[in-house]
Every structure is written in C-alpha cells, then in structure tokens.
Amino acid sequence: MNAWLLAAAVLAVGGLGACLPLALRGEPQHRLAGLNLAATLTSVVLLLLAQGFGRTSYTDLALDLAVLAPAGTLVFTRLLTGEDR
C-alpha cells in the first residue's frame, strides 16, 4: 500500500462516511448538498486510486463524474424549486 492508496482509503471512509447521514435524512436541500459533496469526494477518491494503481481508466471515470455531477445537481435543484415551465 502506498501513500496514494492510504489517502484514498482515509478520504473514502472519513469523507464519504460523513456525507452519508447528511444525504439520508433531513430537508431535501440538505440531502442534495450531501449528495453533491459525496460526488465531489468520490471523484477525488477515484483520482487518488488512479495514481495509486497506475490505471488511467479510473482517471477517465473521475473526470466524467466531475463533469456530470454538477449538471445532476442543477437538475435536482430545478425539481426542488417546484417551478414548471
């Protein structure tokens, strides 16, 4: 195990573990914030795993997630406002 994998493990357990209660309970706005933070942390964890294992496919997945997660957040935010056009 190298430093990249150790950092990924710590961030996955500590960071995503803290996002889980936020994403599972409370107001819909708070759950959306927890989901958005979890997507960001997952992207960083995948980048750390790509460095640790030396695999570029994890980098591609992390970059795809980094691009698509904010778009999903905007869609869910639109649905939470309740405005229809």
Image: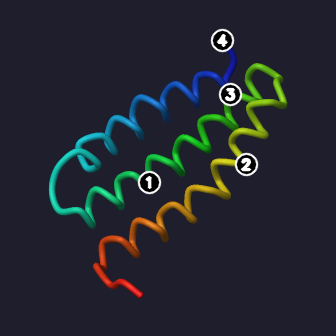
Residue closest to the far front: 85
In this rendering, position of residue 47 left or right of residue 75: right
Q: Secondary structure at mark 3?
A: helix
Which residue is tagged 1? 37
- Measured as percent of width and height from the top left, residue 53 is found at 76, 19
* Residue tagged 4: 1
Q: Secondary structure at mark 4?
A: loop
The residue positioned farthest toward the left in the image shown: 26
The crowding category of the residue bearing disc 2, from other C-alpha atoms within 10 Å (few below 14, some 14 to 19, many at least 20), is some
Could you tell me if the residues under marks 2 and 4 are in contact, i.e. CB atoms within 8 Å? no
- Nearer the N terminus, badge 3 or badge 2? 3
Location of residue 48 by image quarter: top right
CA separation in Å, label 3 and label 2? 13 Å
33, above or below 10, in the image: below
Q: Amino acid at mark 2?
A: Leu
The front one of 46 and 84 is 84
Q: Which mark is residue 49?
A: 3
Which quarter of the rendered picture does the C terminus lie within?
bottom left
In the displayed structure, 42 sits above or below 7; it is below
How far apart are the alpha carbons under marks 1 and 3? 18 Å
Give the number of the disc on residue 63.
Answer: 2
